[in-house]
Amino acid sequence: MDSDDDRGAGGGPALAVGTPEDGPAPDKAPPAVGGIAGLSFPYQLVAAVALAAFGVLACAQLAMVFLHVAPSNTLTKQHGAAVDEWIYPEFEQNWKLFAPNPLQQNVAVQVRTEIAGPDGPRTTSWRDLSAEDARAIRGNLLPSHVQQNELRRAWDFYVGSHDDKNRANGLRGTLSEKYVRRLVMLRLRAHDDGETVLRVQVRSEVRAVAAPEWSDEKISTGPSYRVLPWWKITADDLPEDAAGSGEAGQ
C-alpha cells in the first residue's frame, strides 16, 4: 500500500518534481547581437574600413574648413594653395551672414546666346536664370541645394576672382569663367531645341532692396547691369552627353 507521503492532496499518487527522469531544463535562446557585432567577419571588416574612411574624410573636411576661415597662420601660408583647391568652389565659407552691413541687393544672373541658324547666326533675348530658380523654389517645401545656391555661388565665385573690368585678378579667374560657362550650358541644355550654341554672354542685374515702409530712407530700386564679354563655346563647356555630339560652335 502507498503511504500517505506518496499520495497527493487528492488521494492520487504524488508526482515527483525535479527527478532525474525529467531531464535537464531546456536552455534559453541566446540574446540577439545587434550592430556590427551581429555581422559575419567579412562584413564586419568591410563596415570597419568604411567607417574609418568616412571618419578620416570628415576630419579632413573639418580641418580644411577651419584653415580656410581661420586667420593667416603658418599652415595656411605654407599650404594655402592645397586648402583653396579643396574648398573652392563647392565648400567656400564666408561671414556675410554676420556682417554689420549685410547684403541689401537682389542679384539676378541672365544669359543670352548666339545660335547658328540657316540664315546665319542669330542672337536670342536675355534669359533670367535666377528667376527660373526662384520659380522652382517658390511653393517647394524641400527645394534642392542646386536650386537655392548653385547659380548664386557660381556668380560670387566669378565676381570674387575678377575686377570691375572683368579681368582676372588671380589664378582662379580662368577656373571661375569655365565654371560659369559649364553651368550656363547645363541650364541651356535642359531647355534647348537641338540648336547649336556658338557663343554665350552673361550679365548680372542688380536691384537695391527697397527700404521698409517705416523708414524715411530713399533708395533707388532701378536696375544696374554688369555685362560680361561674349564667350565662345567649346566642347569642354558642354555637358558630357553633349560634348561628344559636336554641338559646340566650331
Image (cartoon, rainbow, N blue to C red):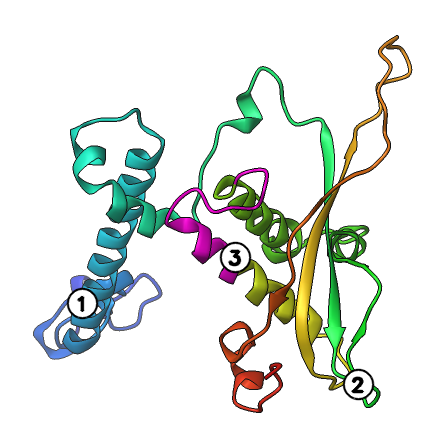
Is residue 121 shown above or below 108?
below
Residue 32 horizontal/vertical position (percent): 27, 65
Rounded to the nearest whole Å, what is the CA distance between mark 3 and mark 2?
26 Å
The residue under the point 37% across, 49% down is 171
Quarter of the image for residue 23 reads bottom left
Asked whether, in this view, residue 221 is left or right of residue 164, the answer is right
Residue on which disc 2 sits:
117
User: Could you tell me the amino acid type at mark 1?
Assistant: Asp
Magenta-drawn stretch contains 170 = yes
Asked whether, in this view, residue 24 is left or right of residue 119, the answer is left
User: Could you tell me the amino acid type at mark 3?
Assistant: Glu
Residue 71 horizontal/vertical position (percent): 30, 24
Which quarter of the rendered picture does the C terminus lie within? bottom right
Looking at the image, tell me whether mark 3 or mark 2 is earlier in sequence order: 2
Which quarter of the rendered picture does the N terminus lie within? bottom left
Looking at the image, tell me whether mark 1 or mark 2 is earlier in sequence order: 1
Residue 228 horizontal/vertical position (percent): 65, 52
For residue 177, which numbered disc appears in the image? 3
Query: Which of labels 1 and 3 is toward the front?
Result: 3
Tag 3, which secondary structure? helix
Mark 1 touching mark 2, by CB under 8 A?
A: no
Residue on which disc 1 sits:
6
